Image (tube, rainbow, N blue to C red):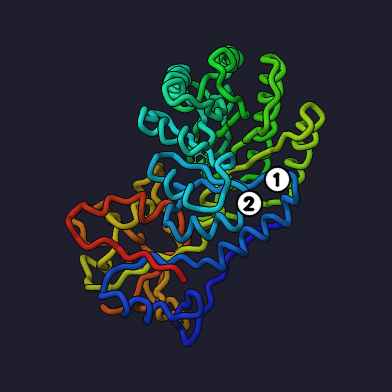
Amino acid sequence: MKQLQVVWEVRDGVILAGGKSVLDLYREHDDRPLYVYDLDKISDRISQLRSVLADSAKLHYAVKANPHPEVVAHMATLVDGLDVASAGELEIAVATQIPPEEISFAGPGKTDRELERAIGAGIVVNVESENELRRLASIADVIGTRPRVAIRINPDFELKSSGMRMSGGPKPFGIDAERAVEAIGELRRLALDFQGLHIFCGSQNLRADAICEAQSKSMDLALATCEAAGVTPRFVNVGGGLGIPYFPGDEPVDLEPVGDNLAGLKSRLRSAHPGSDVVVELGRFLVGEAGLYVCRVVDRKVSRGQTYLITNGGLHHHLALSGNFGQIIRKNYPVVIGNRMNEPESERVNIVGPLCTPLDILGDKVSLPRAEPGDLVVVKQSGAYGFTASPHLFLSHPAPVEIIV
Ligand SMILES: *Cc1c(COP(=O)(O)O)cnc(C)c1O
């Protein structure tokens, strides 16, 4: 078994981030809730993952998980490639030292302007529909260049037990598997530069067996498609999907079987296409555990027997924490009182934000030490899909501050 876990240090009862107390960090930022990203924790995570993957797969970072430019710049020193999903993320990615052929642009609904920018930057466009393929070709024709293109396939299977399913059945993502060979034929007639295939089945999965099964089926599909189309891919991107433990009872993914499986996939790919690489693309697994969200208790009240801690943070800053970012049943993130880490749990409380909606929940009946106004609520597992995945403008409170330690 190889399961990775992140530990945040504590000194004198206060959580430390990058050796600094979260109380001090909070005081330095004008009473505004914080996102804190710890770059050393990202480095550790990647070196531990690399020790399992060895050289079986190239590691790409999915920028949308945390597009903070300093996080992405740090990532770029550690991973082999970056995956972007908009022209905004593209600009962040091309500002790093990652070479353009290792930057890919996936996502439905790319505008002509975005395609033009992608072609100009020389990155790989992961085409999501036949129409997008044709638009790309006609834009390239005007510019007079030959863009790098990969075909994203919507397979006829899914990643089982995933937080979010992104494949199987009708989907806005990718070209249906049964039309992929034809699409590659069209790509070649249009004289575009075929780079490889991209198959992404889902995200937030903690089960190694489900991840291995989806990655193996993705490789089967990619090899069969390339053979039928008579093309040699430079890479096959088999997706990722590795999740992190958010909720009570969640266990980290066992990486050993995932690493072993990828080694097998690489040797299958190489025997059909020497020189071709397996790529995995991960977002939250690389950054999610390296981030904290910190807010302050503003008020404490009892309503008909239940205690409420009311904070200056909430769903407008951290939508996923409130259970409104794709979760079906709301469960509690790991929440602590960041300046009372040495005190025993002594009460069950509801932690809520300042928004006038019952959806603004940070913690539902969580056992904590007694907290008072001024204490800090610290939410772990907040490094991915936090700041940029939240509706900051709702209720016109100040946005949180992002800091790097
Ligand atoms: C969002 C996304 C990812 C990253 O998902 P994580 O759950 O953060 O690992 C990877 N690839 C594609 C195509 C995505 O849309």
What residue appears at the point 53 percent right and 77 percent down from the top-left corner?
A: 9
Which quarter of the rendered picture does the N terminus lie within?
bottom right
Residue 192 in view (yes/no)? yes
**Type of amino acid at the residue the image marks with label 2:** Val
Secondary structure at badge 2 equals loop
306 or 145: which is nearer to us? 145
Q: Where is residue 34? Give x, y as percent.
A: 35, 67
**Rounded to the nearest whole Å, what is the CA distance between mark 1 and mark 2?**
9 Å
Secondary structure at badge 1 equals helix
Q: In this view, does 326 lie to the left or right of 197?
A: left
Q: In this view, does 335 lie to the left or right of 256?
A: left
The image quadrant of residue 270 is: top right
Residue on which the image places disc 2 = 253
Q: Where is residue 117? Give x, y as percent.
A: 41, 36
The image quadrant of residue 177 is: top right
Is the CB atom of the residue marked by disc 1 within 8 angstroms of ligand 1's nearest atom?
A: no
Q: Is residue 341 above or below residue 325?
A: below
Q: Is residue 195 left or right of residue 123?
A: right
Image mark count: 2
**Type of amino acid at the residue the image marks with label 1:** Val
Residue on which the image places disc 1 = 258
Q: Is residue 325 left or right of residue 148?
A: left
What residue appears at the point 37 percent right and 46 percent down from the top-left corner?
A: 325
What residue appears at the point 29 percent right and 59 percent down from the top-left corner?
A: 314
Whether residues under marks 1 and 2 lie with C-beta atoms below 8 angstroms apart, the answer is yes
